Image (cartoon, rainbow, N blue to C red):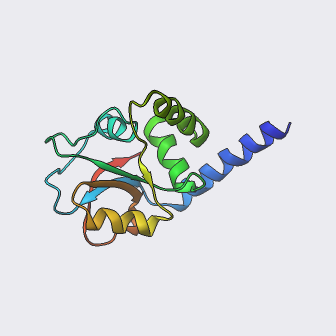
Amino acid sequence: MRRSLATLLAAAGSIWASMALGDLVVVVNASNPVEQLSRSEVVDIYMGRRATFPDGRTALPIDLPSDSPLREAYYRSLVDKTIPQINSYWARLLFTGRATPPRALSDLDSVLETVAENRDAIGYADSDHLPPGVKVVLTLQ
């Protein structure tokens, strides 16, 4: 009973969070030569399957903390997984030493500031809160 209630509350929170936000967008530094990324390219970067942008430069994926509703909405939209599923995925990869998870920062402002200051950084946000210095390379539905 407790688990199903927790699942229901998490789902309701995700729905509420996604309704309160603009579109979920993937952003890079404004001076990054990448103009657009496919969903599969972003999945590969965020799931540790690829460490570079299509032009071969290193990609530095930036994440929000595990308790962020925006992070939950992002991974639901990107790979249809919950945060516990994402954490389990990364635990397995870390155990094998095959990849390193995206660097998690404390809040959205920190993520966007890091992307705006680092040409190789990639992050995500809702489209209603984009500062100068970043550009959208993918919009998630």
**Residue at 41% in and 59% down:** 125
**Residue at 26% in and 47% down:** 59
User: Is residue 13 placed above or below 6 in the rendered structure?
Assistant: below
* Residue 49, position as x, y percentages in the image: 34, 32
Q: Is residue 6 left or right of residue 61?
A: right
User: Is residue 46 placed above or below 19 in the rendered structure?
Assistant: above
Q: Residue furthest bottom?
A: 132
* Residue 58, position as x, y percentages in the image: 22, 46
Is residue 96 visible from the viewing direction of this image?
A: yes
Q: Nearer the viewer, residue 65 or 33?
A: 65
**Residue at 58% in and 39% down:** 82
Q: Is residue 18 left or right of residue 33?
A: right
* Residue 17, position as x, y percentages in the image: 58, 57
Q: Nearer the viewer, residue 51 or 26?
A: 51
> Split into 4 quadrants, where in the image is the N terminus?
top right
Q: Quadrant of residue 101?
A: top left
User: Is residue 20 placed above or below 79 in the rendered structure?
Assistant: below
* Residue 40, position as x, y percentages in the image: 32, 34
Q: Nearer the viewer, residue 35 or 68?
A: 68
Q: Is residue 75 left or right of residue 66?
A: left
Q: Residue furthest top?
A: 96
Q: Is residue 30 left or right of residue 61?
A: left
Counting labels gives 0
> Split into 4 quadrants, where in the image is the C terminus?
top left
**Residue at 37% in and 65% down:** 112
Is residue 81 visible from the viewing direction of this image?
A: no
